[in-house]
Image: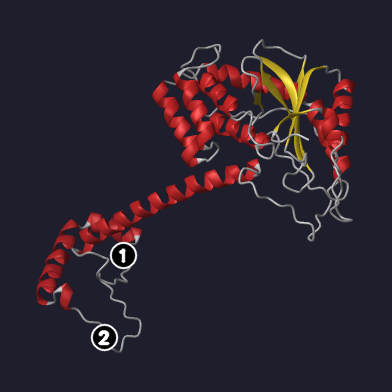
């Protein structure tokens, strides 16, 4: 048994004792996942060039990654990865992505890996269906990653701009911890690899990023990869829909209330929730700004109309003007001037500040003509 998180053999994962969580819990064994992935990759004409597995010390949480021979770009090979657990800390997920042949880091699209399944009911059959669906659309996912790479290479990013983006990922989104942030910083100062397009590009920074999290805890590894890709492409408006074939029909099983999934990791969040949170923050800030502008406008109008600050005087005046009355004023400017003189005299006799509401008037409305 390994003493810490690190690479383990396939035989080790297959020998980990299966969990016993009650009758409602459906075991998705590491062996079942490994056998299914290899079988389906072979059925769809993909060949495994390299495979690697990582796990916690007790083998309860594990990840598997398979580098495939399919390669349309010398820097990126197609890959398949999965995460599974026996302790309810992580829900099963499987994705198609790519492995960098330069630094060995894994990359997936931002909307990949958002399918997760609790271990209840027919979870094992649904997991197999998801593996097949991912492999079925492998070509589309891989092509989009190549397209994203090309667009990132065209984005010039100075060291100062890279530092700002690093701060955003660390302090705002919380994707990076201090350790991984320092790895990115070190790579920015002295890159350990050469990336096509040069060091002052978004593509180079993205590689520093995925390289820094390639050894993350198996519980958070795939989620960090996914969110890193989403945030980078979203910040630079590179997101694009991926045309894929319809996934296999999966049976939806009502979750058991007495078997809650433990979500102790802040990174274990769905993409939809991430998008909603980000957009909600932007909308809230926009609404606050609009409200401030509206309040300022109302104060200015009030001061022009009444010569006082409307925050200190309660008003209930109706300033609606009939269109026909407006036309009459335009046609009879002399009459309007006479009315204005009368109003001026009236205001001298009855100053606005001294007007008191009639106690008998329950409405308390004052109409000015």
- Give residue 297's quadrant in the image: bottom left
Looking at the picture, tell me which residue is in the foreground, 129 or 240: 129
Residue 12 or 129: which is nearer the viewer? 12
Q: Where the N terminus falls, by quadrant?
A: top right
Q: Residue 358 carries which label?
A: 2
Visible residue check, residue 236: no
Residue shown at 59% from the left, 26% from the top: 210
155, above or below 318, in the image: above
Answer with the quarter of the image where residue 75 lies.
top right
Labels 1 and 2: the sequence-earlier one: 1
**Residue 179 visible in the shown view:** yes
* Residue 292 against residue 210 in the figure, above or below: below
Structural distance between the alpha carbons of marks 1 and 2: 21 Å
In percent of width and height, residue 300 lies at: 25, 56
Residue 364: image quadrant is bottom left
In this view of the protein, which residue sits in the foreground, 154 or 203? 203
Query: Which residue is the site of mark 1?
Result: 319
Residue 122, percent from left and from top = 88, 46
Colour mapping: secondary structure
Q: Residue at x 71, y 52 (%)?
A: 262
């Amino acid at each position: 048994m390994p003493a810490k998180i690190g690479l383990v053999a396939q035989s080790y994962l297959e020998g980990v004792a299966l969990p016993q969580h009650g009758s409602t819990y459906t075991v998705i064994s590491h062996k079942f996942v490994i056998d299914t992935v290899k079988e389906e990759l072979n059925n769809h004409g993909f060949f495994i060039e390299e495979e690697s597995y990582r796990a916690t010390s007790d083998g309860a949480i594990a990840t598997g990654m398979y580098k495939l021979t399919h390669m349309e770009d010398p820097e990126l090979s197609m890959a398949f990865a999965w995460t599974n657990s026996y302790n309810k800390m992580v829900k099963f997920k499987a994705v198609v992505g790519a492995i960098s042949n330069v630094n060995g880091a894994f990359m997936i699209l931002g909307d990949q890996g958002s399918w997760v399944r609790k271990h209840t009911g027919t979870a094992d059959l649904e997991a197999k269906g998801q593996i097949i669906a991912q492999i079925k659309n492998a070509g589309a996912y891989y092509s989009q990653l190549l397209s994203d790479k090309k667009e990132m290479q065209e984005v010039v990013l100075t060291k100062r701009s890279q530092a700002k983006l690093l701060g955003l990922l660390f302090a705002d989104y919380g994707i990076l911890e201090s350790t991984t942030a320092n790895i990115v910083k070190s790579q920015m100062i002295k890159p350990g690899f050469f990336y096509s397009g040069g060091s002052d590009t978004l593509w180079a920074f993205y590689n520093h990023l995925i390289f820094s999290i390639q050894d993350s805890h198996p519980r958070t590894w795939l989620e960090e990869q996914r969110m890193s890709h989403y945030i980078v492409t979203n910040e630079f408006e590179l997101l694009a829909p991926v045309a894929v074939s319809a996934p296999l029909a999966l049976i939806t099983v009502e979750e058991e209330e007495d078997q809650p999934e433990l979500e102790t990791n802040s990174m274990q969040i769905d993409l939809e929730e991430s998008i909603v949170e980000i957009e909600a923050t932007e909308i809230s800030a926009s609404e606050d700004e609009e409200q401030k502008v509206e309040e300022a406008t109302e104060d200015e109008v009030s001061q022009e109309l009444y010569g006082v600050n409307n925050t200190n005087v309660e008003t209930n005046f109706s300033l609606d003007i009939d269109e026909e009355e407006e036309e009459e004023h335009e046609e009879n400017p002399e009459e309007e001037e006479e009315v204005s003189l009368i109003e001026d005299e009236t205001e001298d006799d009855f100053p606005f500040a001294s007007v008191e509401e009639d106690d008998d008037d329950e409405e308390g409305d004052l109409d000015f003509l």
